[in-house]
Amino acid sequence: EMEYAYQGELVTPSRCGRMDQACAFGSRPVVMTYDGEFIDVATVRVPRPLHLLVVDLCAKKDTVEILSKLQSCFPFAKNEDERNVQALLGPINKALTGAAIDAIEAGNVEEVGRLMVEAQKQFDAYAGKVCPSQLTAPVLHSVLRHPAVAPYVYGGKGVGAGGDGTHA
């Protein structure tokens, strides 16, 4: 079922990746690791409540353009910005995701929030340079910085392809 869904994704303009297939696991939190050929799935243990808000910013983004620019950095980077995107979506992402899983499993929701902020900072610094027209995300950043929101959250970040769309 997941393979058919992925094959369907490949014919859409955005050509989304395999991670969208996590939906097949329902409301159970999982971490999916894709090594280029196989997907490994492991359940993430959540020992205390972790409340996430998913917010529709009522703004626009062009996911097709974002993914096209990010995908153009692979498999061979042509400049420093593209090498930085490869690092962002490779070792930087792996380290931040691993730390977030550890924080979730330890019940450290404050650290989860801090890691979300760090992930957004890294995304802005590296991905934003290859697609500034879409990834500057002024609406997202205004919400994340809004003083009325700050007392109630530990952190926030864009999700999916990034930009000003729906975010957690």
Image: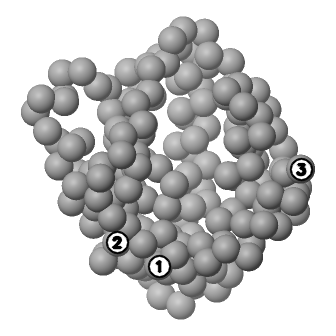
Residue at the image point whose x is 33% and y is 33% from the top: 155
Of residue 46 and residue 2, the one placed in the foreground of this image is: 2
Front tag of 3 and 1: 3
- What's the CA distance linking mark 3 and mark 2? 32 Å
- What's the CA distance linking mark 3 and mark 1? 28 Å
The numbered mark, 3 or 1, whose residue comes first in the sequence reads 3
Q: How is the image coloured?
A: one colour
Q: Could you tell whether 163 is left or right of 47 in the image?
A: left
Residue at the image point whose x is 47% and y is 87% from the top: 79
**Residue bearing the label numbered 1:** 65
Q: Could you tell whether 99 is left or right of 121 in the image?
A: right
**Circle 3: residue type:** Glu
Q: Residue furthest front?
A: 58
* Residue 2 position within the rendered picture, expressed as x and y whole percent measured from the top left: 84, 51
**Cβ–Cβ below 8 Å for labels 1 and 2?**
yes
**Residue bearing the label numbered 3:** 1
Q: Is residue 128 above or below residue 40?
A: below
**Circle 1: residue type:** Glu
* Residue 121 position within the rendered picture, expressed as x and y whole percent measured from the top left: 33, 52
Of residue 35 and residue 142, the one placed in the foreground of this image is: 142
**Residue bearing the label numbered 2:** 134
Residue 82 seen anywhere in this rendered image of the structure? no
